[in-house]
Amino acid sequence: MTKNIVICFDGTGNQIRASGNTNVVRGYDMVIHDLSDRQISYYDPGVGTDPAIGTYAPIGQFAARIMGIAFGVGLRAKLAQAYTYLIERWQPGDRIFIFGFSRGAFCARGLAGLLNSVGMLRPGSQNLVPYAVSLYAQSCESWSAKRWDQLHSFSRTVARREDGKFAIPIAYLGLWDTVSAPGIFKRSMQWPYAPSVPNALAGRHAVAIDEKRRPYREYLIKYLGDQRLVDEAWFAGIHSDVGGDYADDDRLSDIALKWVIDGAAQHGLLLNTEKYQRYCSVESTYAMGKIHRVNWLWALLIFRRRRIPDGAWIHASVADRMAEDDTYRPSLPERTTIIDSQWASPATDIRM
C-alpha cells in the first residue's frame, strides 16, 4: 500500500515554540502523523537553531547559532538528514509532500532538486548520502559539463531506477517566501533544479510583497515555458507576515497558511480536521492584519524593494486590503491576476 511522506523544513532561526510558531510548524501540527501505512512525517528546525553536536557551553551554542543564521552553516546537513529519512522509508508509489519557509523553503526546493538529479539511493546506501549531497549542493556560479557528468555517473551507479527513470516526482511542494541567500553574508548557492523544481507535480508558493531587506531577496519559481505546476502568488506583509512567526498578530500569515495547506489537501495530504479549523479558519477582516516593521537599522543599511514581475498572481486578500485602506498601495505591475477570491471560505475537501 502506498503512503504519503511529509517533509517539513522550518525557517531561519525558527523551531517549535509555545507561541508565535511559523506556518511550517502549524502545518506540521495539522498533519496526521504515524499512520505507517498511509502517512508519515518529518520536521526539521530551521538553520541557526541547533548547537553543534557536542557543544554544551552557552558561548559555544550561541556561536553555532550565529554561524547558522549569518552564514547558512548547516544547510547541507539538513538536506542530508531529510534525504536519509526518505531513503530509509520511501517505496515506489509513495507520494512525497515537502514544505518549507524562508531558508527552509530553499532547502525544500533543494531536496526536490536532489531527487530530480540524483534520484533515490538504493536501500542500504545511507553511507553515500554525504557524497550525493556534496555532488549536488555546490557553491558555484554555474555548473560545468564535468560536474554534470560526475553527478550523472553517480546516479547511474547507486540510485534506484523506476519506470526507466532516476528522477523522483514530488506530489506537492508547499512554500512560504523562499529566500535566495543561504546566509546573510554569503552569496547564493547554485543547486540544480531548485529554481524550477520541474519534478513537482503540484505546489503553491506564497511570496511577501512588503519585504524590503536585501538579504531576504525573493527566490521565485523559474517557469519552464508555459508549464505552471507550482502556483506562485503574492501576499501582503513582510517575510514573517507570510511565513508566520509573530505572536501579536498572525492574521496575514493565517491567510498564506490556509492557501498553501488547502492546495496540499486537494492533492491528498491527510489532515486533522479539528486542528485545520483551529489554524485555517480565517475571516475577511484578516486582510487588514498587521504588517510588521523591520528594525530601523535593517531598513537604513540594506533596503531593497521587491520587484513583482509582470503578470504575477496577486492574492485576493491584497486587493481587499487595498479597497479598505487607501494608504496601502504596493507597487504592482500593470498586468496581474487576482486569485482565490473565496479565500475566507472554508475548504470542503479536507481528508483524514
Image (cartoon, grey):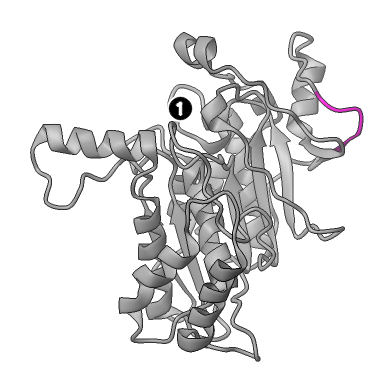
Q: Nearer the viewer, residue 239 or 129?
A: 129
Specify the segment rendered in magenta. Answer: 332-338
Identify whether 164 is placed above or below 8.
Answer: below
Residue 159 lies in the magenta stretch: no
Residue at the spot x=43%, y=52% of the render? 29
Indicate the quadrant where residue 289 lies.
top right
Q: Which amino acid does label 1 sit on?
A: Tyr
Horizontal side, residue 31 vs residue 229: left or right? left
Horizontal side, residue 246 vs residue 339: left or right? left
User: Measured from the top left, where is residue 101 in percent x and y?
Assistant: 51, 44
User: Measured from the top left, where is residue 245 in percent x and y?
Assistant: 45, 32
Indicate the quadrant where residue 158 lies.
bottom left
Q: Can residue 281 be seen in this view?
A: no
Residue at the spot x=21%, y=44% of the render? 51
Mark 1 residue element? loop
Q: Quadrant of the C terminus?
A: bottom right
Residue at the spot x=60%, y=89% of the render? 162
Residue wearing tag 1: 246
Identify whether 34 is placed above or below 227.
Answer: below
